[in-house]
Structure formats: C-alpha cells, structure tokens
Amino acid sequence: MDKMKKVPEIRFKEFEEEWVQSKLGDCFLERVERSAIGELISITINNGVVKAADTGRADSSSADKSNYKRVEVGDIAYNSMRMWQGACGYSSYSGILSPAYTVVTPTNGVDVKFYYYLFKRTDSLYQFRINSQGLTSDTWNLKYPCFSKINCMVPKEPEQKRIAELFLHIDNLISKLEQKLEKLRNIKQSLLNQMFVNVNRGGYAPLIRFEGYGEKWQKFALGDLVSIRAGQSPSFFNKGNVPYVKVDDLNNSYWLQINTNYRVANNDRATLIAKNSIVFPKRGAAILTNKIRVLGENAYIDTNMMALEVSQEISSNFLGFNIENCGLFRIADTSTIPQINNKHIEPYIVYVPKTQEQESIEHTFVLLNGILEKSSFKLTKLRTMKQSLLQKMFV
C-alpha cells in the first residue's frame, strides 16, 4: 500500500478514490436466529460453506438441533475456532449449522463476496488470529464481539463488486482445471487397470490391447528384470552439479524426474543411479502416494528412496507404468511403518509383452502424463496468480 494514498498496488483504472477504514461490525451484523429445520450446512477451509451431505464425512451433528443457527443465502459463516486458518465462506444455501459457528449478514453498501476474498488474505488471517481469545491455538476463538472490532480498509461498493467479479472468474477457471485434472487422472487409472495384466485378476493378457497384438504376456519376477540400488545421506556429499533426488522432489514432476532442489558433487564411494532408472519412496507414508518416476539424467538419491536400474530387455517407462498400476502399497510391508526392501521387490510378479507392444503402451501413458503435467502447471500458475492478486488488489 502507498503510505501517502490509501489505495492498493494494483487497481482497475476507472477507480481513483482512496479506500476508507471500517470496522467489521459496521459491515456485518451477527445473525442470531435459531432453528432446528433446514438443510445441515458445514464450513471448510478449502471450499468454504458447503452442504454437510457433500463433505463425505459421517454426520456427527447433535440429534437435538433446536439451538442450531440459521444461515441464509448471501451470509458469511465461519468456524469461530478456525477463522484464523481461513475457515469461512459465502453461503449459497439456506440452512442450519452448529452453534459453534458464527454467521454474519452484510449491511447496506457491502458486497459480501468482496469481503469473502478479503478474509482469505494473509493480513486478514493474522488479524483474526491476534483478535481470537484463548491461550493456545487449540482454544483460539473469534466470536462476533471480537470480530466486529477488527478494522479493515475498503473501497466503495462498485469497486468491491469489480474486485469480487475478478476473483470469482479466477476461481471458476481454477475449478474447471481441477475438474479436468480429476477426469484425466480417472482416465489414466482406468487405462492402467485395463492395459496391463492384473496379477489379482489372472490371465496372461490385458483387457484392452492395441490392434495387431495377441500373444500372451510373459511372467517374470521383478528381481529378474532390475538391479536394485539404494541411496545415500546428503551428509555424504559436497555441493556440486549432480542432481540429488529426495522424496519431496517427486512432487515437482509427473513422470520424468529432472527437477531437484539439491545438487551435489560426484562421490566415487556413492552409487550414481543411471538415467532411465525407476525411483520411488521406500519408507513411510510417501509409499501410499504411489509416486513413481523415471530419472531424466544420472542422479544420486537419498536414503528414503529406492532405484531400479532396468535391464535392456524391457522399457523403463513400460515397467514404471506397470509398477504404478500394481501400486507401491501392494508391494510394501504395511503392517507397521510402510517400507519396501529388496525382499519385497525381487519376488514380485509382473507380466511383460514383446518390445513393440511395450513401446505402444508406454507411448500412450507418456502422452497422458504430458497432458496431466501441462494442466497441473496451469493450475499452479493460476493459484499463484490468485495469491499474488489477493495481496496486491487490497489495502
């Protein structure tokens, strides 16, 4: 914010007036009506106000709802104990919610959706935190009397509407991309299930095949197709130019692993993992995420990962997708802390077709992953842009 003029850093060009300071109590009144009748509403940090039936959680509401609060379309409802984390939303529904929540209704000259986005800003969350009552984060509670005393800078209603419209448009784009990604992931998973031989389903051929292929797939123990490699601790290395891949780095790619946050110098006492090796987590909850990648260049890996250097008779991409279809959690010992050791890899059964069919299958999934990666990148850019604008389009 310009210290001389109370205006945001980025602004629609048709607006020039300074923003003014208001108390939230001047902008919102608490809705105090109680009712046991109406659809049950819930509040989430990520999705705001939603129907309780759509959360997928078991109904833990009280049987006696006579003290439940009413919420109407256009209200803002928030979780009094989680407002400092952003647990609030604009209500598109009429219904009832737990008395643990707070419901506020806008006064004249207030665009409620503008305030919804204002409440999601980092500065606002900080204000909600320091104005909450309670000794620890588990007991912090922002009731309406404290909420109403918080100051905020706001423009006149026409500018509020323009800002809200922009963020609603961005959220709509984000939602469409999220839906597209979900559909693509479902398509990929369906094809993985049907284009590879499923050990549990039995048989020596997949359910879906490209035209021209009819031979049975060959059965192998995974240990006959790969050489298993372990990683080294980062303390083993000096800084340098060779990629050092950690489990967190697997989040930076969809398949080909070339991006790492850490690079080290060559060390003859460490095992350099060859390009095109399959890498994945071998310990802890990360196994359950089923993140399997193929190295795009020679690299070292950390001790929480395992690498499979693949023999020349089989495609790394094909085998990687085959293992993705199997699921790391099916290979791992999950009786206590999930872990994968050589004894789990070596006997695991996989089915493999001839080279040409391998190449046709891997081409399909490499293309799919490319589409997923581009869509995911667009989604990340949109989310980043939204967060930047939230900081720069408000005072």
Image (cartoon, grey):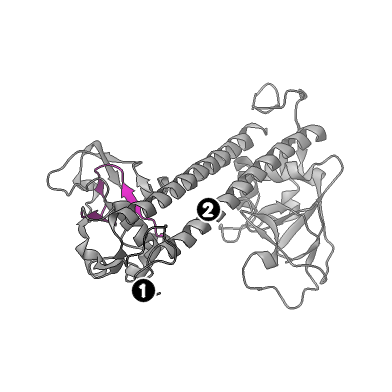
Q: Secondary structure at mark 2?
A: helix
- Is residue 298 inside the magenta stretch? yes
| Bounds of the magenta segment | 290-311
Tell me the mark number nearer the camera, choosing from 2 and 1. Answer: 1
Q: Position of residue 163 (x, y in %)?
A: 72, 35
User: Looking at the image, how many numbered discs can be counted on the residues?
Assistant: 2
| Residue type at tag 2 | Leu
Q: Which mark is residue 98?
A: none
Q: Quadrant of residue 381?
A: top right
Residue 307 percent across, percent down from the top left: 26, 55
What label does residue 203 carry, if any? Answer: 1
Task: Specify the farthest residue to the bottom.
Answer: 63
Q: Label 1: how many residues lie within 10 Å, few (<14), some (14-19) or many (20+)?
A: few
Query: Which residue is at 76% across, 34% downward?
Result: 162
Give me the residue at 48% from left, 56% from top: 188
* Farthest left residue in view: 268
State yes or no: residue 160 in magenta: no
Q: Quadrant of residue 57?
A: bottom right
User: On the image, numbered disc 2 is attached to which residue?
Assistant: 184
Q: Report, in whole angstroms, how far the alpha carbon at label 2 lies from the one at label 1.
A: 27 Å
Which image quadrant for residue 154?
top right
Quadrant into which the N terminus falls: top right
Q: Nearer the viewer, residue 170 or 138?
A: 170
290 or 310: which is nearer to us? Answer: 310
Horizontal and vertical percent for residue 247? 35, 52
